[in-house]
Amino acid sequence: MKTAQKDIRKLSKEELRQFFVEQGDKAFRGNQVYEWLWQKGAHVFEDMTNLSKETRALLDDHFVINHIKVDQMQRSADGTIKNAVKLHDGLTVESVLIPTASRTTACVSSQVGCSLNCKFCATARLKRMRNLNPDEIVDQVVVIDQQSKLYHNRPLSNIVFMGMGEPLMNYNNVLKAIDKITSPEGLGMSPKRITVSTSGVPKIIKKMADEAVRFNLAVSLHSALDEVRTEIMPFNEQMPLQELKEALQYWYAKTKKRITYEYVVWEGINDRREDIDALLSFCKAVPSKVNIIEYNPIDDGQFQQASPEAINSYVRILESNGITVTVRRSRGKDIDAACGQLANKQ
Ligand code: SAH
């Protein structure tokens, strides 16, 4: 009987209201239940204390609440926490809490595995199993918010979609999740504190711009030369840099939001002067800044972080041309929680 029951969080608020009307109750009950599900994070109908016993029993007869479960939690020496979370069908994704002096950031997954094949990324080695549902994304945020309060005495302040998967390949669900995270009837967080990171899917970037989304956009660029980028991110063959650039120009024209480029410098791959020049000219096409991230080895020795001199050259040349650059050290490396290391290694 239980298995045939519907996951209640698949219903919109309107559908919930409709359900109660069909049951001869008031539509308003739907709003109450919606709040329990999306604002108060109820795991069981039992907890919905402003509903009568009969109403709770009715819900229990018709629906289930599929909630993610933290299967394993690891804490890094630097305060980073990595969660392996189990989904209702037994699959696992990872999400990470990253504390700094001024903020706590949740790094959440959008897919189980990934369909892209970036050569330097551990997640790429798992094939894409499925997209996450909106509730599975929201649950990761809720879990990390609780951990932030428990271990760092403050609520979560920022969210980055930089966990497993390509958010723009699961665009509809990511958007629905962000809607729940930002709406006052949900978690009420500001979209300004949310960043969606993409390896660059031009068609969807344009669509997001058309829909006037209010969160930030980061693009994992890693090279502004097609021949290099295709080598390390083979999907670039189908979605070349010119198309990406046009989509980003469109994004900026519509949203007026500056783009962040994520960039790793590897020895012998993108550490030449021409790589820097190409990045510089790419940066000039759209208001943007560059985030140079440390390479986190994924144990095959194929890629190696470039020398500090090579990285300094990037910084010097970009900065002297008026481009903002930050060089970011990785967090949580000792527990494989850093960028590109999420791969359900257990
Ligand atoms: N698919 C999205 C979301 C993943 S974000 C995207 O590509 O943006 C993960 C970030 O970590 C991306 O910027 C990715 O390029 C970067 N990354 C992947 N593997 C890495 C590694 N081994 N070391 C450092 N960064 C890595």
Image (spheres, rainbow, N blue to C red):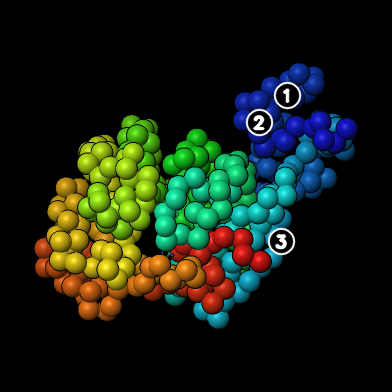
- Horizontal placement of 317 versus 40: left or right? left
Residue 96, quarter of picture: bottom right
**Residue ID at (69%, 54%):** 86
Farthest residue in the left direction? 321
Label 1 crowd bin: few (<14), some (14–19), many (20+), radius 10 Å: some
Residue 61: x percent and y percent?
85, 32
Nearer-N-terminus badge (2/1):
2
User: Alpha-carbon neighbours of circle 2 within 10 Å: few (<14), some, or many (≥20)?
Assistant: few
- Does the residue at mark 2 contact the one at mark 1 (Cβ under 8 Å)? yes
Structural crowding at the residue carrying mark 3, measured as other residues with C-alpha within 10 Å and reported as few (<14), some (14–19) or many (≥20): few
Give the numbered dot on residue 56.
none
Give whichever of discs 1 and 3 has the lower sequence position: 1
- Percent across and percent down for residue 153 are 58, 71
Label disc, if present, on residue 71 of the rendered structure? 3
Give the structural element (helix, strand or loop) at label 2. loop
- Residue marked by disc 1: 19
User: Could you tell me how far apart the alpha carbons at marks 2 and 1 are, in whole angstroms?
Assistant: 10 Å
Closer to viewer: mark 1 or mark 3: 3
Q: Is residue 171 left or right of residue 303?
A: right
Q: Quadrant of the C terminus?
A: bottom right
What is the x, y in percent for residue 262? 33, 59
Residue 173 as seen in the image, left or right of residue 280: right
Q: Position of residue 290 (x, y in %)?
A: 27, 61
* Residue named by callout 2: 11
Element under disc 3: strand
